[in-house]
Image: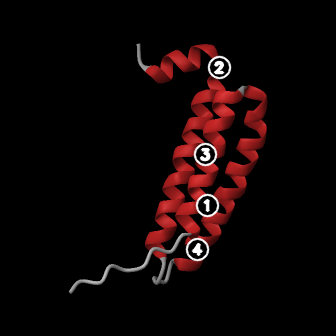
């Protein structure tokens, strides 16, 4: 039995929250790739909206139990870190 089907059988919100988390992480990653391109502003606004959505999901998921709330909080943290952490470019000798 596939995992998503097994989770949906108990609570369909688990798959929805997982899907929103995946979309949020993809949007945060895509925002990094749009930096320095003509799409940078659109990427930043999209990421801001995704962060707001994920924050809302994180707050709502507290009612679903500690497991899903923890993964939502970790996803929100990862999205924030992906967007704000600037790693220095590697210098080759």
Tag nearer the camera, 4 or 2: 2
Classify mark 4: residues with Cα within 10 Å, few (<14), some (14-19) or many (20+).
few
Q: Earlier in the sequence, mark 4 or mark 2?
A: 2
Residue 69 falls in image quadrant: top right
**For this rendering, which residue is in front, 12 or 51?**
51
Classify mark 2: residues with Cα within 10 Å, few (<14), some (14-19) or many (20+).
few
Seen at 71% across and 43% down, the residue is 57
Q: Mark 3 points at which residue?
A: 74
**Disc 4 to disc 2: CB gap under 8 Å:** no
Q: Name the residue under label 2.
A: 11
Q: Which of marks 1 and 4 is nearer the N terminus?
A: 4
The secondary element bearing badge 3 is classed as helix
Seen at 54% across and 69% down, the residue is 85
Q: Mark 4 points at which residue?
A: 42
Q: Name the residue under label 1.
A: 80
Q: Which of marks 4 and 3 is nearer the N terminus?
A: 4
Q: How far apart are marks 1 and 4 (CA)?
A: 17 Å
Which label was assigned to residue 47?
none
The secondary element bearing badge 4 is classed as helix
Seen at 61% across and 60% down, the residue is 80
């Amino acid at each position: 039995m596939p995992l998503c089907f097994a989770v949906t059988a108990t609570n369909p919100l688990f798959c929805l929250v997982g899907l929103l988390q995946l979309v949020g992480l993809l949007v945060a990653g895509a925002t990094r790739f749009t930096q320095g391109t003509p799409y940078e502003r659109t990427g930043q606004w999209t990421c801001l909206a995704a962060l707001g959505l994920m924050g809302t999901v994180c707050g709502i998921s507290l009612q679903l139990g500690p497991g899903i709330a923890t993964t939502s909080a970790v996803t929100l943290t990862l999205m924030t870190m992906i967007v704000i952490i600037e790693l220095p470019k590697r210098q080759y000798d």
